[in-house]
Image (cartoon, grey):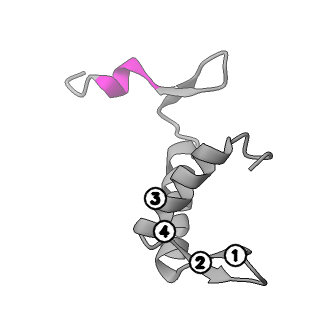
Amino acid sequence: MYRGNLSYQQLELYLNFMLEKQLLEVKRGFGAAKTYSLTEKGGKFISLYQNINDFLHEPSASSETTTSGVQTPSVKDANPSQ
C-alpha cells in the first residue's frame, strides 16, 4: 500500500475490482488476516500486459526520439501518401 503510494480506500477499490474480474482470489490466513493470490486469469493478464508494454517500447527504425526520450512516429510515417 505504501510503496504503491495508495491510500487504504484506493487499495480497497483496486483489490475489489481485481477480485470481481477474477484476477485475484482471497485466501484466509490466521484469524482475520487475508492473503491475496493471483489466479490463472490474473497471470494471463500480466503476461498480455507485458507483451503490449514491450511492443509499445521496442525501438523502431521509423521513429524519432524527442529530448524527453519518448519515441514519436516520423512525419513520413504519419503520411503514407509520400
Instruction: Say if mark 4 contacts mark 3, CB within 8 Å.
Output: yes
What residue is at 46 percent from the left and 58 percent from the top? 17
Neighbor class of circle 1 (other Cα within 10 Å; few <14, some 14-19, many 20+) is few
Q: Magenta span covers which residues?
A: 73-78
Residue 24 or residue 82, whichever sits in front = 24
Residue under the image location 25 percent in, 21 percent down: 82
Residue ID for mark 3: 17
Sequence-first tag of 3 and 2: 3
Q: In the rendered view, would you say 54 is above or below 20?
A: above
Instruction: Give the residue number, with chain letter if any, for mark 2.
Output: 26
In percent of width and height, residue 70 lies at 59, 26
Residue 66 lies in what quarter of the image?
Answer: top right
Q: Badge 3: how crowded within 10 Å, few (<14), some, or many (20+)?
A: few
The Cα atoms of the two marked residues, 3 and 2, are separated by 13 Å
Q: Name the residue beneath numbered marker 1.
A: 35
Q: Of the residues shown, which amino acid type is indicated by label 3?
A: Phe
Q: Position of residue 65 (x, y in %)?
A: 60, 24
Between the residue at mark 2 and the residue at mark 1, the CA separation in whole angstroms equals 6 Å
In the rendered image, residue 71, in percent from the top left (x then y), is placed at: 55, 29
Mark before the other along the chain sequence, 3 or 1? 3
Residue 36 magenta: no
Q: Which mark is residue 19?
A: 4
Q: Residue 31, located in which quarter of the rendered image?
A: bottom right
Instruction: Give whichever of discs 2 and 4 has the lower sequence position.
Output: 4
